[in-house]
Image (cartoon, rainbow, N blue to C red):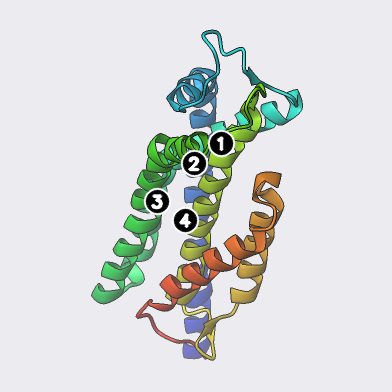
Amino acid sequence: MTGETAYISYNWSLHEHFSELNVIARRISFALIVMCLFWSFSIDNLITQWLGLLPLETGPNNENMSIYGPFDWIQLRWSAVILLSFLSLMPLISIQAYSFARSGLYPVERNWLISVLLLTTTIIPIIIFLIWSHVIPILFQISEASGRPEGVLVRYDAASIFSIGMALSWVLVIWSVTTISLSLTRMFGMVKNGKPRFRKRLLAISSGVIILTLPIEFDGLKILIAILSLLSANLVSNSFPGRIAT
C-alpha cells in the first residue's frame, strides 16, 4: 500500500501542477487579448511616428512613401499589434513562470532562472526598442549616405521598411521563447544523456518559424540567422545547473 499511496500522491501532485499551469496559461491568454485590443487603437499612429524617425526623403506629405501590397500591410499591422502585446506581457510571463517553478528549485537554480527570465523578458524587449528607435534609422542613414542613381526618383515601400524591424523583433522573441522552453525542460528533469528530450523538436520548430516568417528582404540570410539564434538559445539553456534525469 505504501507504493500505491506514493503513486497516487505523485499523480495528484502532477495533476495539481498541470492545473496550476493551465490557470496561468488562461490568465496570460486573457491578458494578451486585452493588450491586443489596446494596441490596435494606437498602432497606426505609432507606425506613422516611427516612419517619421527614418532619415528618408519622403516629401512634405509623404508622397514618396507608398504601399504596394495592401494585404501585406494589414498582415504587418496586426503582427505589430501582437508583437507589442506580447512584449507588454513579458514581465507578467516572467513573474508567473518564476512563481510556478520557484517551490521546486534549489537556491542556485532559482538564481539561474531569475537571470534567464531577466534576459529573455526584460533585456530583450529593451533591445527590441533600441533596434526600432536607433539601429534601423542608422542603417537607413548609412544606406542614404551611400548615394543613389542621379535623376532617378526614389519611392519607398512602407510595408517593406516596416517588415525589416518586425523580422528582427520576431527573431528575438522566438529566441526568447526557445531559450525558456529548453531551460524548462532541463529544470523539470526532462533530460536524457545530458540533453533535453524535446531539444531537437524545439529547435526544429523554432528554426522553421524563423525561416518561414522572415520576409524576402532577408533572403540568403534566413538559414544563417536561424542557426545563430538557435545555437545561442541552446548555449544559454545548457548553462542550467539543474538535476539530470535518466
Which kind of residue does numbered mark 1 sit on? Ile
Residue 198 seen in the current view: no
Q: Amino acid at mark 4?
A: Glu
Residue at the disc numbered 1: 82
Out of 101 and 61, give the one closest to the viewer: 61
Which residue in the structure is indicated by mark 3?
Answer: 124
Q: Tell me what residue is drawn at x 62 percent, y 17 percent.
A: 64
Secondary element at image label 3? helix
First of labels 1, 4 by sequence position: 4
Local crowd size for mark 3, using a 10 Å CA cut-off: few (<14), some (14–19), many (≥20): many
Q: Dot 4 corresponds to which residue?
A: 20
Real-space CA distance between mark 1 and mark 3, rounded to the nearest whole angstrom: 16 Å
Earlier sequence position, callout 4 versus callout 3: 4
- Which of pointers 3 and 2 lies earlier in the amino acid sequence? 2
Q: What kind of element bears circle 4?
A: helix
Badge 2 is on which residue?
Answer: 86
Label 4 vs 2, first from the N-terminus:
4
User: How far across and down, in percent of the image, does residue 240 sit?
Assistant: 38, 76
Picture residue at 52% right of the left edge, 79% below the top:
190
